[in-house]
Amino acid sequence: MLNAIRIENLRSIQDSKFIDLKSLNILVGANSSGKSTFLRSFPLLSQSINKSLRGPVSWFDVASVDFGDYVTAKNKFVSEKETIRFSFKLDQVRRNRIRVNFRYRYINYYNLYNLTKEENSNIGVTISLNNDVKGTYMDRVILELKSFVIDMSVDSRNSPVKILINGKIDMTNYGVKNKWSFTTNHGLMPTFIGKDNEDFQVQTLNLAVNKLIQFCDKRLKKQVRIESLFNLLDSSKESLLKSIKNTEIISLQRKTADWDIYNETFQEVYYLWITSQIPLLLWIIDEELKGFYSGCSYIAPSRAEASRYYRNQELQVKDVDAYGRNLQEFIASLTDKQYESYSSFTQEILGISIGVANTTGHQSIYLQNKNGKFNLADVGFGYSQILPIITKLWYITQKRPYEEDAKRCVVIEQPELHLHPAMQAKIADAFIKAIKKGKENNIDIKLFIETHSQSLINRIGRRISENFIGKDEIGLIIFEKDKEGKNSIITQTCYKDNGQIKNWPYGFFDPIDL
């Protein structure tokens, strides 16, 4: 699970440092301080992962966010050699999250679990983006694991990948010379192109096997007997050395009897074995990132105005778009059971029910309360702005059929626009309700909210003091510009038990609930 992110050299963010991701993340700061850049990095990676690309990143999408291209997205105040980088901290990989993929026939899955397992530790991932005349490509990937730092880099798009382990062991010296493919199929990480189209895992493990074959009797005919030495429950040097020394291949056992973990040949074999697991590591990390970003939704700061009538396209809509333009089709697509749940949610938050009325060729959205039923176009601009948000919050709390380990990420810019302060406070309640409802349905929800609303921030503090939500579930991320007005300065703070904000910077409004 993704639990922290760091952004470097993206627009005004020269270095965000690692930002811990909470259930509810509130971004505050002056205009042009970097909030939107940080916030929109989530839909940026989402729109990249959800497409088949010739490179790692889709810089613009008319339905989501637009960063222009690599050149316009890169920080203007760093050197030409600097690159745009994203770093992630992932929870340790769990065994039940490793899905069998028969392409990786030479890799033991428990072995990978032990490679990444460590108490109170994370897997660190850094990706570096560069640019050439063909567009954006990935020039470096760093994996920080339990016992290893694996640093992979290319000098240019078509150059071989240099693999360094722990900063000093260059796998090129052992015959590992492969390139990356940057064509992604709904993912982020690059894949290896094996030499002469040979599978990278097979090729690399064969290099390790051939190192050991030279110590075996020439009568050995079954190479698989050596391959089986690498099927271990532990990826430590000690375990592999023990496997080699206890082998049933007598000649190998005899010639390696005096080996220790510092033996030069053994170390070559060991690091070739570790290298053979890199593609699976990249694949599993890619799965974790896809699990988070592929379902990341975005709500733009200015939502669509209400219309009195909408053309009925009879679409089966599965989600609300960034501007709420398909709201009527989404509501009309709900089953009776879903609509009952949706109505209950809007009643609790707003005190109204929302529905869609059909006429020949047209639809209209109506609001209903104790005073009657009203067309959305007749009840004020604010409702058209809040309904896409409330609808999205309800939708992310709903478990899909056969879904396990559900994750939801929603990014919302300035939800308070055109709303009375009392209504802004109700949105804060909706955020908290969505998080609580998600927990009841075993859904991990993360909300990222850019706001200037004192009412919204104060209501969250009040709900903390009333024990509606724990202070540890809320993150406050403060954005400022440096003295020269060039780069963003980003700090994290939190709420106290009494609902007030810790280390609230001078110049912001007074964080006291009125």
Image: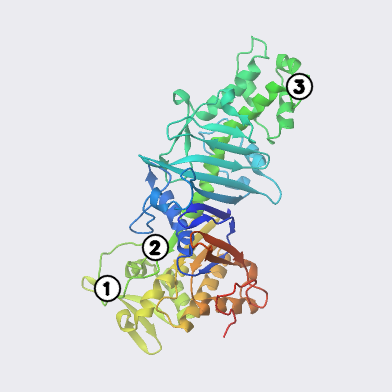
Nearer-N-terminus badge (1/3): 3
Q: Which residue is mark 2?
A: 319
Badge 3: residue crowd in 10 Å (few <14, some 14–19, many ≥20): some
Front residue of 117/169: it is: 169
Residue drawn at 54 percent across, 73 percent down: 433
Instruction: Kindly identify the amino acid type of the residue bearing the numbered disc 2.
Output: Asp
Nearer-N-terminus badge (3/2): 3
Badge 1: residue crowd in 10 Å (few <14, some 14–19, many ≥20): many
Q: Residue furthest bottom?
A: 371
User: Residue 26, percent across and down?
Assistant: 54, 68
Instruction: Kindly identify the amino acid type of the residue bearing the numbered disc 1.
Output: Gln
Instruction: Kindly identify the amino acid type of the residue bearing the numbered disc 3.
Output: Trp
> How far apart in space, not on screen, are marks 3 and 2 (Cα)?
60 Å
Residue drawn at 68 percent across, 26 percent down: 267
Badge 2: residue crowd in 10 Å (few <14, some 14–19, many ≥20): some
Q: Which residue is mark 1?
A: 363
Mark 2 touches mark 1? (CB < 8 Å): no
Front residue of 473/418: it is: 418
Asked whether residue 197 appears in the rendered view, the answer is yes
Q: Which residue is mark 3?
A: 259
Q: Where 52 falls versus 429 (above or below)?
A: above
> How far apart in space, not on screen, are marks 2 and 1 (Cα)?
18 Å
